[in-house]
Amino acid sequence: MAELAGIRAQALAGPSEKATEAQHAKGKLTARERIALLLDEGSFQEVEQLRRHRATGFGLEAKKPYTDGVVTGWGTVEGRTVFVYAHDFRIFGGALGEAHATKIHKIMDMAIAAGAPLVSLNDGAGARIQEGVSALAGYGGIFQRNTKASGVIPQISVMLGPCAGGAAYSPALTDFVFMVRDTSQMFITGPDVVRAVTGEEISQNGLGGADVHAETSGVCHFAYDDEETCLAEVRYLLAMLPQNNRENPPVAPCDDPVERRSEVLLDLVPADGNRPYDMAKVIEELVDDGDYLEVHERWARNIICALARLDGQVVGIVANQPQTLAGVLDIEASEKAARFVQMCDAFNIPIVTLLDVPGFLPGVDQEHGGIIRHGAKLLYAYCNATVPRISLILRKAYGGAYIVMDSQSIGADLTYAWPTNEIAVMGAEGAANVIFRRQIAAAEDPEAMRARMVKEYKAELMHPYYAAERGLVDDVIDPAETRSVLINSLAMLRNKHADLPSRKHGNPPQ
């Protein structure tokens, strides 16, 4: 027992105090310190703590530390099982070798078999060069398991250091990516390679830092200033997700009354369709205690994707943001929302869609960039989703964007509208210019004729009850009652069951 205690102490301490100090000097925690922050106190059960590599050559045979640079195991977050692996940068720079990869494969297999979330705490220098192709094959095994677990258990990647080359594809395959500013980077080819090939000068953070991936590339869902805040938010996210695709998300106690009226909504949303407002404030007013977690908050800001609770039940919210680009759909917004809808559907999270959309963003860049293909991703995601789906039209819903944003015609279970809604092929001004082009051109006063035709079109086809009269909207509701209407509707749909046609898998637009 004394011998075992000595070996365990050696494994827990890591390579040296100097290596630990170097890690702290970079503003980074050690692998075990991170795990302690992520999991409930005292709950971590380590797997293969005494594993060592068997490689030889290049001096490896003389350096065989316990854990081989990755700490693996399971514990709990708010009492629910979570599997975790954490690279130990102090050992081989966290680089992946054969034994290191085998440990990760094992914990991934255990997570899939147990039906529990998997969190990876990434801080590694990529493949262990001294082990050659064996290290590369180890990444292949991780990617294969990421794909096998996709839509089965929640997978969360937390970037707490460098992640370069092929290693970056594992986080890209997972459901959520967290990053910490200044200390974490992700890129396929680093600044030195970029400089050699293209002549461009750029720093590591400028190429693949947290802000770049949170705002520009969309690779990162959440970015934070320090590891403690980041890991606390991972815990918060896990508390809103089910253990696996066979369970529902956890229900939380709620003191926010179901019947709470939201009179403030009447002032938050202007009746004038051309005036912007902050959709985030609408969401805050509707959900329990005004609390929600926005996903991809800084990327594609013209659409909001958020997890929240209504009467303690987790819901996914997709909403146009009129404050940015008037809330239009473009390539990035379509991709962002499509991915979020797919995640919600995979993990039994009902979807509430808040519409105020003037259409798709026009422009040569959008058309040449494939807005048809990318917009179809969102359409496909909604059409394929079998979870409860409720859409609410706050103000305007024009053209194909209205259809794509979970209209009744593509399978929304319930569609509501506020009395300010306008559902049409396009805005009244544009429609009048097309329909009454000749009359306007022939009139003595074209502008007066145009104004009269616009008014006529609005009166005939764009009044708030036109869609309700034709069964395209289930009800026109008082905005102040929106919270109770949504909660009661979701309660009715809670046991919804819908089967998709038998098939190997669909072929969604890419």
Image: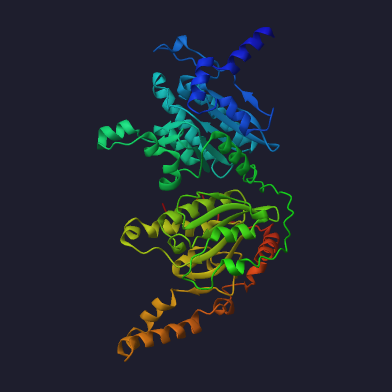
Q: Can you see residue 345?
A: no
Give the residue drawn at x 33%, y 87%.
446
Determine whether 54 is above or below 70 in the image: above
Q: Position of residue 199 (x, y in %)?
A: 25, 36
Determine whether 160 is above or below 445 in the image: above
Identify the coloring: rainbow
In the rendered picture of this protein, how many numbered marks are placed on residues? 0
Give the residue drawn at x 47%, y 55%.
301
Give the residue drawn at x 69%, y 66%.
261
Q: Quadrant of residue 36?
A: top right
Q: Is residue 449 left or right of residue 99?
A: left
Q: Position of residue 387 (x, y in %)?
A: 61, 56
Quadrant where the N terminus sits is top right
Q: Quadrant of residue 501?
A: bottom right
Q: Can you see residue 139?
A: yes
Q: Is residue 375 left or right of residue 9?
A: left
